[in-house]
Image (cartoon, helix red, strand yellow):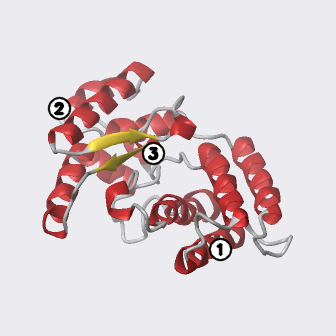
Amino acid sequence: MLQGYGCDRNALAGSGRSIVCRYVGLLVAIVCVVVSGCETVSESGRQSQGDKILSSLSDLERQILIDKKVTRAEEQRALQIYTQCINDAGMQVVVDAHTSDKIGLDYVSVESAGESASDSSEKERARSACRNRIDAIDAVWVLQNAPTYEEIKLAESNLRKCVAHAGVKFDGEAGMDTVLAAIGEKLQRARGTGDLNADSDVAAAQECVRIYSDVAGKVPPPGLADALKKLK
């Protein structure tokens, strides 16, 4: 799963950073988890991300994860609680129109109208508190619905072809980490020059990444499967 679900659209609105926040952050996470393969536990014995997520469960998480499974209805219930929590904090959850048929924290973002620098940190604390109430449920949901190896490889192949047509430059034999880095650089350059929403090639590259992320972007935290087995 990609941590830091969603972006604060109000804070990023009009700057083009929303695309970079969602997609460049996604690319970095995918390089780590899908392409390079992150260690689930370091040699020093520190907890994996999966261990950390399951180490402090809310009452709701403990109730739902008692059978170590998450049904679609349970995931929807968790998201409803998250949405209400966000609303109570004076913000709003927005569902991505491109993925309205899918559920999970990765497919929503948070808007907060009129947020100033003075209350930004307070809103961030509220967002984190809302996430912490259900993030373990969402993580297990992601684990259960993670893409297969074959699905990821097909998505990678399609991404290569798609971004090449969009003018992203990379060697044909380059590894996926190089391809993803090249896409990220193109989006970052476009943001810097103000062409993020005006350049047709950049728009096409964004769409390529969106399609790719719909398949390969949902990956569980490293170590979650083992942590779930140990959960009591």
**Quadrant assignment, res 64:** top left
At x 75%, y 69%, the residue is 175
Question: Looking at the rendered structure, which numbered label has been put on residue 106?
Answer: 3
Q: Position of residue 198 (x, y in %)?
A: 63, 66
Q: Is residue 114 visible?
A: yes
Q: Looking at the image, is 207 positioned above or below residue 68?
A: below
For mark 3, give the secondary structure: helix
Q: Which mark is residue 186?
A: 1
Name which of mark 3 and mark 1 comes first in the sequence: 3
Q: Is residue 198 above or below residue 156?
A: below
**Dot 2, how many residues are within 10 Å of its Cα: few (below 14), some (14-19), or many (20+)?**
few
The residue at 48%/39% (across/down) is 142
In the image, what residue occupies the spot 19% across and 69% down?
A: 117
Position above or below: 107 against 16: above
Q: Position of residue 68 (x, y in %)?
A: 38, 29
Residue on which disc 2 sits: 59
